[in-house]
Image (tube, rainbow, N blue to C red):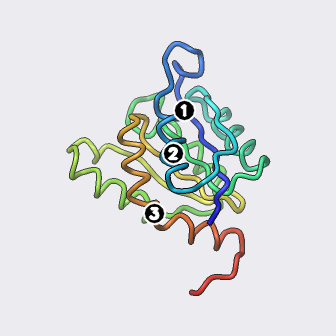
Amino acid sequence: MQIQTGIITVSDRASKGLYDDLGGPALKHAAQEHGWTVLSELQVPDEKPEIQRAIREQISKGCQLVLTTGGTGVALRDVTPEAVRDIAVRELPGFGEVMRLESLKVTRNAILSRCLAVVVEKTLVICLPGKPSGAVECLRCVSEAVPHCVEVLQEVPTAC
């Protein structure tokens, strides 16, 4: 399935040009390897309204899947999960559970991750870690469920 994808890097430093965004490009490469089309890439600071605006902007551009990287840790500025939950119509807890479980095989600090997936309007939004390798690995863990989820959200007839 051709999935129209948007990528949002949530980082105060990257959004100000003080830090090279490595997570966004890593996710773009991973999305393209899955055969998904990346329509839009944005960088925003760790601010709830900016994160929400970026998600809505990508949805308005036709994105069926939005991937965020950053802001899912425990630092005080890490507000991505809260920002996304505030605009979600439902949460899909299995995504976060699988990402944490698989990440625990790599690092004990995965228990601190607040990765999640939600539905905003008819779009799947997956919030991934800020570390590029962590973001790509977490996406890999859940990528097989993405096409079916997007089809269901887009009301494409499915076999189940």
| Residue type marked 2 | Pro
> In the figure, residue 134 lies in which quadrant?
top left
Task: Determine whether label 3 and label 1 are within 8 Å by CB.
Answer: no
| Residue where numbered disc 3 is placed | 93
> In the figure, residue 74 lies in which quadrant?
top left
| Alpha carbon separation for disc pair 3 and 1 | 21 Å
Residue positioned 53% across, 40% down in the render: 80
| Residue type marked 3 | Pro
Residue 17's spot in the image, x, y percent?
57, 15
Return the mark for residue 81.
2
First in sequence, mark 3 or 1: give its number.
1
| Residue type marked 1 | Val
Task: Label 1: state its secondary structure.
Answer: strand
Q: Which of the image's four quarters has the C terminus?
A: bottom right
Task: Label 3: state its secondary structure.
Answer: helix
First in sequence, mark 3 or 2: give its number.
2
| Residue where numbered disc 1 is placed | 10
